[in-house]
Amino acid sequence: MDANTIYAVVDIETTGTNVAEGNRMIQFGCVLVQNGQIINHFNTDVNPQTSIPQSIQALTGITEAQVKRAPLFDDVAGTIYSLLSDTVFVAHNVNFDFPFVNAELERVGYPRLEIQAIDTVTLSQILLPTVPSYRLHDLTAYLNIEHDHPHTANDDALVTGELLIVLFNRMLELPIVTLQQMVAEDADLPQDTADVFKWGLAEVRKNPRSLPDYLYVSHGIALRKTPVIRAADDREYTYPRTKKNKLKRFPKNFEWRADQAKMMNLVYRQYTDKESANQPLIVEAPTGTGKTLGYALPMAYLAQKYDKQVVIATDTVLLQNQLVNQTMPLLERMLPFETHAEVVKGNAHYLDLSRFKVSLSQADHSKQTQLIKLRLLVWLTQTATGDLDELHFKNEPPYLDSVYHHGIADLTDTDPFFEDDFLRRLYQRLKYTRFIIVNHAFLIRHADLLGDNFHQPYLVVDEAQHLADYALKTQRQKFDFQVSLSTSRRLMEFLDPENEYGLTAATEGLSLNDDLKTFYRWLIEFSRQLRALDDYLTNHFKPQFGGKFTKPYKEIVISETDWVNFLKQREGLFEQLDILVGKFQDQLAKITDSFYQQSNRWLKSDEELFMRFSHAVNALTDAWNTLTAIRQAPQHEEAGTGSYLYWLTVSNDLSHIMVASNLMTVEGFLTQQVYSHFQAPTFTGATLFSSNRSQYLYDQLDLDRSAVKMRRLKSDFNFEAQAKMYISNDAPDIIKEEENYNHYVSQTLIKMLSKVNRPTLVLFNSLAAIESVYGSLTEAIHPKERLILAQGISGSKEKLIKRFMDEDNAVLLGAASFWEGIDLPQDKLQVLVIARLPFDSPDQLETKVQYERLKAKGKNPFYNLSLPKATLRLRQGIGRLIRTRQDYGAVIVLDSRLVTRHYGQTILKTLPASLPIMTGTVPQLLSDMTKFFKKHKSISHDS
């Protein structure tokens, strides 16, 4: 490759993926790119002389009739061969297009193309590291490249050519030190893609540029400078209480919302009125109220007035991003003073620059790891935070375990990247930050850190109905004996003196060798004692295991008394193991210092081996710390309260045992462990209450109802005009006829989808039900008619939502998190189907125990837990449909219990009073729903 190279950017459409299996090309598109410009193009349909699968026709729009009169591949092969010769072949997924083109050429008698080939997927992943999706259509949308006809070879080739030009320009803007590091990695990329960076480095060396002002180089790595935050001024500003004063501060095109203004004043008065300042506040602010600005604006004035900081705890990443990217910029335009917000996450979300630098010097045979290293090098020229979430990894790659941050406590001023460290810089910025945005889990784990460091700041808990769930999740601990024994065995292999490829052999003759041999002896003793503890635990609780196992594993609840008795009986053994784990940690620190003091002695393979050893030691000590937390759980609860649940998970042959604990109630926990570190909190959310009189939310938030100020704002949506709810009264018995019920749901959906051609979300309670219904739908509905997407089958949640939004009339089957937390634009969801009321399964271990606890207190588990929880979830599900004043849509509930059971009326009373509701048979409901959408189509057209 050089400056004058011609790049042949190719896209093909085919009947399948393998020429040898009879698949053929049906369309060929190519654009030629040279010196950053498209200089020529060629495209043609191809007659495959075989049928085109319906799925391919639906995807590409290419029909058999269209290609019937097209030339055979034999007729165009010469043109294609000449066109591609002496070029560099480029494709978006080159490992498909290039081999397929060559196979087709060879099939008709041409030799293989012996030319270089590069991949724009890989180049995009490296040079655009923060893009959420690398599908061609998503990339072109991200880069504002027109892409009118996806999955047609000509259009795809054209936009891939434009993408290639963007990528080359991005590469040539990289600092020379970054390109040097990338080339030095010698990554194994698809075909000849790695050569692009060698060419780029040569070009940059020929035309060197000075480093941009926003970058600097530290220890051979180019980094982005972080913006300097000025300390807030200490002047007091008058809060705009009246509509007139608010409008003066609001942007001209800002929509006035009366309830949002009411919420602002409510929050401000809460903390300026001496009588209510120490009183928690709950505000239910329905969707469309503008609640984030409703609390952010008054909190900004309060923070300025009293020189305090504000911690906002949110439920989802979506809401965190909305606060940072939408609410805060808008807030800054409204305020007469400067304010600043920072998102704070757990240590493992941030890159440790020192660990990353060490990893660059280590050879790695994993192609995934090599690719990630290149992405990180480019990303470091872009990120000011070091937050690995910016890279949108779908599944966390194992490599990240070796480079994520272990916390400020592990950072010393001798660290080469001490001044550059992302976490250290973040905590420095927090001193001058008014708004600190965290998620619920971080708040619960680090309430003391946030409260003590920032002198009892204000606290706003958004989507507060989830706080209790996160409190319970963060206290869940599980220790797996087999995993820890396996880790111990792996460590012994690293240190075995008989292993000529181990660490002990590599350090022969050094003082370090003695330390490793000592560690090895301790590991042998640790493994022996841990196996003994495993045996003692199994034998102690064996009488409680019961009879024959019906499944591979059984969960056995053990009482706090039995658990404490076992701990006392084996106290000496636990103490010996505690001492050994303490020695591991001290010895690892000593060994690490010795190892890196002699860093010039080691081969890359030695460094890699030591890194794996270090990770395994940390994993072993972390696991032991988990068991320690389970041992200490009884100390955190008052005798007999039953706050914690303890259980064993045992395999049917008793060879595998896990011990676990979990907090079962937030009673006393949130008040003592979280709220005590802050000013009296404000709790808010769109759907907080299951009824006006319900005690459920107060119990979930660990609040004394009599000491809380509560307000429920009204929605200003016109539900009578915008929506309609349909309830089926002919569904089979959902409890007695599970299989028949899934069949009923499937058949109802098939009928509905044939009559109502609107984007549809179907909410279920289990993935098993989704799988059953999905199978029936895909058999009955051709993909060309409706795209059917299913959680657990069609990809990740992010991928499902993206594909759903890309289609005009897709059907998405979801459970769990799909009940809430997804925010679809107004025209992307118009029908919501509730397959069954969202009650928790009573068979879940923790649910059973919670029911027993409530019964012991003389409470009804159904009315005090199941019903309010299901009611809130149903309200949240329905909240997916109407999110703005322009939205319209229909909800259909296929669970007749909503009208046949007494509690159904309790649920219905929580829904908006103006929401029209129709009950009837499925044919009656579908007939009316068709009229509803005809009416709205007419309204939409007229407007």
Image (cartoon, grey):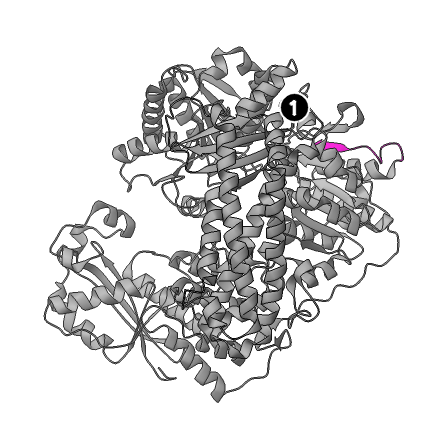
Q: Quadrant of the N terminus?
A: bottom left
Measured from the top left, where is residue 436 in percent x and y? 71, 51
Q: Which residues are magenta?
A: 274-283
| Label 1 neighbour load within 10 Å: few <14, some 14-19, many 20+ | many
Helix, strand or loop for disc 1: helix
Instruction: State the residue position of label 1.
Output: 696
Q: What secondary structure prevails in the magenta region? A: loop
Place residue 695 in its image quadrant. top right
Q: Is residue 282 magenta?
A: yes
Q: Residue furthest bottom?
A: 206
Left or right? Give the position of 787 relative to 699.
Answer: left
Residue 113, visible in the rendered structure = yes
Residue lying at 16% horizontally and 65% vertically, measured from the top left: 104
Residue lying at 64% horizontally and 77% vertically, measured from the top left: 213
Of 136 and 846, nearer the camera is 846
Place residue 244 in its image quadrant. top right
